[in-house]
Amino acid sequence: MIALEAVKNIGIPLLVLGVIIVIHELGHFLVAKFFKIRVETFSVGFGPRLIGFRYGDTDYRISAFPLGGYVKMAGENPGDSVTGAPNEFLSKPKWERFLVASAGPIMNIVLAVGLLTALFMHGTEIPEFSEGDAIIGTVEAGSPAQTAGILAGDRITSIAGKDRPNWEEVEARVMTNGGQNIPIVLNRNGQDVETTLTPIKQGKNEAGFSGMHPKIRATNIIGSLQAGMPAERVGLLPGDEIVAVNGEDLKTSGRGVSEIIQSSTEETFPIRIVRNGETKEFTVTPVLQDGQRRIGVGFSFPTIVVKENLSGALARSIDKNVEYGTLIFQVLGKLVRREASMKSVDGPIMIMKQTAEFWELGLGPLLQLMAMISLNLGLMNLLPIPILDGGVMLLLLIEGLMRQDLSLAFKERVIQVSFVFLLTLMVFVLYNDVVKWAAPGP
């Protein structure tokens, strides 16, 4: 049992991150080899070498700290011993070096698009409410949505600059704008209503919360059970379909489970369910919570299966990745402007934790998370920080415009400053991860 937990919590996340890192470094490696640059090291992880093998000029290794990886090319760094040999990195034209530097992030972006394309071609189940128009089903009392004057039945036609959003896009903009005023346009009975929504910050990541929820087609199939509540105690199970409450047939009465429970005067009453084609009856005694009679069941969302041909899957994948990428840069902008907290940023520890959780949900959610991580890695490496791929590309562009190389002393100083900056940032992110991981609650 302990071994299985270790595989789930450590092995699966390391495998997922390892694949993403290998794909990134493989981009650098293949383009370097194409331009006949000698590659000295291909490493997954940083620090001391753990295991590996040598083939030709290259040492293929796994290193001690699985927080990334690198490809070391001959004559790549300013401090390296440069002989001027034709197979050294600095001996190559700037455009070739630019392509080598850009290949890693490009491979990560291609991986993200490829993963979602494959998922949509294979077919994946998604909540029914996430497709089509974003229609509001309920608004919590005292919530930011109620304060903004949002009502059940409103259709969201624009939010934070996104026109005709689906519910997934609405949730993404709410979550990334905690504490910020965001414009929202609603269609109410054919009339446009403009207002401003200010989501409050919630949870360890201080994600935005609005208190508005999607309109969901009613279902009486139990999706979850609250521990210790009456439904669990009497033996109801997820997947059971409730067909009658207190003798009232749900299909003929048109009333919902909660509505019947609230209106019932009996302290104890029967609930009839269908389980695997067999009808069963249980007797439950509701408890009072927040002034409501409850038995502790949550109902599953109606779902639809998305399955596309190659062109449709590719188009859907590109749309998703453009949406993810836009949100990534929006969050980065908020961090720079200090409109968002660093608590909203997850580091390696939290990413591994989320990967283990998504593994439990199934292949579809895991592939979507893997695509997001790969896209994040690709876009982050394009940032113009000299120790990253984007920084290398920026220096090459500057040198190209100047028509001369920057001095080695200048490059060394820039790399040193960048390394200290990234190391400080990594320490902060890891500390932030540990605090969030140790903190109780969602």
Image (cartoon, rainbow, N blue to C red):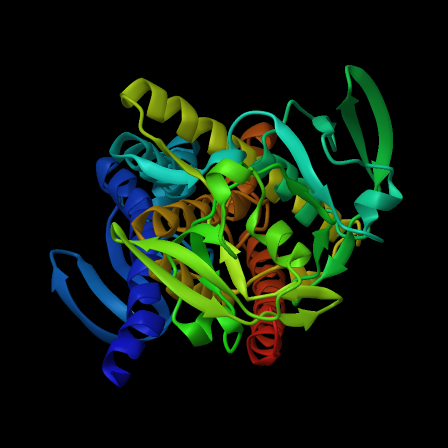
Q: How many marks?
A: 0
Res 202 quadrant in image: bottom right
* Image coordinates for residue 260, horizontal then vertical, percent: 61, 52
Can residue 74 be seen here? The reply is no
In the orientation shown, which residue stands out farthest toward the bottom? 2
Res 111 quadrant in image: top left
* Image coordinates for residue 143, horizontal then vertical, percent: 81, 51
Can residue 95 be seen here? The reply is yes
The structure residue drawn at horizontal position 55% and vertical position 75%, both measured from the top left corner, is 437
Query: Residue 227, relative to residue 111: is it above or below?
Result: below
Q: From the viewer's perspective, tell me whether residue 255 is left or right of residue 309.
A: right
Q: Name the foreground residue: 212 vs 332.
A: 212
In the orientation shown, which residue stands out farthest toward the left? 55
The structure residue drawn at horizontal position 58% and vertical position 30%, both measured from the top left corner, is 166
* Image coordinates for residue 393, horizontal then vertical, percent: 50, 39
Q: Name the foreground residue: 153 vs 276.
A: 276
The structure residue drawn at horizontal position 22% and vertical position 42%, both measured from the top left corner, is 33
The structure residue drawn at horizontal position 36% and vertical position 72%, both measured from the top left corner, is 9
Res 383 quadrant in image: top right
- Work out which quarter of the rendered image holds the N terminus and state it: bottom left
Query: Residue 55, relative to residue 174: is it above or below?
Result: below
* Image coordinates for residue 145, horizontal then vertical, percent: 80, 44
Q: Name the foreground residue: 325 vs 272.
A: 272
Q: From the viewer's perspective, tell me whether residue 11 is left or right of residue 232.
A: left
- Work out which quarter of the rendered image holds the C terminus and state it: bottom right
Q: Name the foreground residue: 65 vs 245.
A: 245
